[in-house]
Amino acid sequence: MKKKKKRMPKNEAWNKTRLRLPDLDQAKTAVLNSLRSPESQRGYKHDIDEFIAWYCSEPRLSFNKAVVTRYRIHLESRQLAPGTINVRLASVRRLAYEAADSGLLSPELAAGIRRVKGAKRLGVRLGNCLTVDEARLLWQLPNTDTLKGKRDRAILAVLLGCGLRCRELAELLFDRIQRREDHWAIVDLIGKAGHVRTVPVPDWVKQTVDGWVNAAGITGGNLFRCVCRAGTAWGNNITEKVVWHVVKEYAAKLGLSKIAPHDLRRSCARLCHDAGGELEQIQFLLGHVSVQTTEKYLGCKQRLKGAVNDQIGIEPHLNGSGFGKV
């Protein structure tokens, strides 16, 4: 006599296909706890919160492949860029993985969500970069007669000359700038995902930073501090919002309203490349794990004028008629 299979309780079966708000919050917390980088945590939190708001606005939705596909169509209807859509879908997939690991979602449904195709990306978008003249005007724009001007000029110089991320600059310590191999450098800088690197500091950047340090009387702790209206330094550090406002303030004065702090990091990479810098060295400077990321920053593309195979050493000597002798 065959034994009857036990039926799964109705509530348990419901939890395997539909996630309620407490379940989504639990899975979101698990996703954020698995990330080390504050930038990644902030990005994933924003993307997951947007998905949860959309998911809860639709009644009786199951968390499955069809629903995530509908969410992708919703994002496309908002005219978002393909890269933005794919980043948000990656956050939703990560949410499904954590929900499955926590027993809140069926593994089969999580596997189906993984198979949701992202938006097609046609062509290559180039980031916003400054020219040589624009970059020089930008960092020299702050008035060095005031303490705030000295600090702002040092901030812009470090962003453009060293290519630091916004958080890396806000958390930069005074004793990290040291002399190595007869050159100034930021040593043991902890970047994104905990990666440690050493960043060379040009002499003009070091002189600009020294002007701020000497005027503010900084001898330790964080390199950059807040400046009050009375014109004195106070506090122990600055936030990323301060860096953001400094960049936006002086960029607006040059008519560059769409420039953000990360654009200065991208501009640093592009200017290094245009000056003849090696791709590998630029990768070390920026702290990229993959050289492909560095190539995206540089916007590398094929160049026909002055092509790489024009002068490779096997060309015939040209005569007056323009043809080589055979």
Image (cartoon, rainbow, N blue to C red):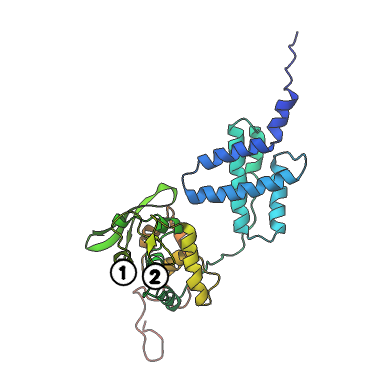
Residue type pointed to by label 2: Arg
Please indicate whether residue 228 sits to the left or right of residue 19 in the image. left
Quarter of the image for the C terminus: give it. Answer: bottom left
Quarter of the image for the N terminus: give it. Answer: top right
**Secondary structure under the numbered disc 1 in the rendered image:** helix
Residue 127 in picture, x, y percent from top left: 52, 66
Residue 220 in picture, x, y percent from top left: 30, 55
Residue type pointed to by label 1: Gly
* Residue under pointer 2: 153
Residue drawn 41% across and 47% down? 194
Q: Nearer the viewer, residue 75 or 117?
A: 75
Q: Earlier in the sequence, mark 2 or mark 1?
A: 2
* Residue under pointer 1: 211
**Secondary structure under the numbered disc 2 in the rendered image:** helix
Gap in Å between the C-alphas at discs 2 and 1? 9 Å
- Tell me if I can see residue 129 in this picture: no
Residue 250 in picture, x, y percent from top left: 48, 72
As drawn, the residue found furthest toward the front would be 230
Q: Nearer the viewer, residue 198 or 59?
A: 59
Please indicate whether residue 180 sits to the left or right of residue 296 in the image. left
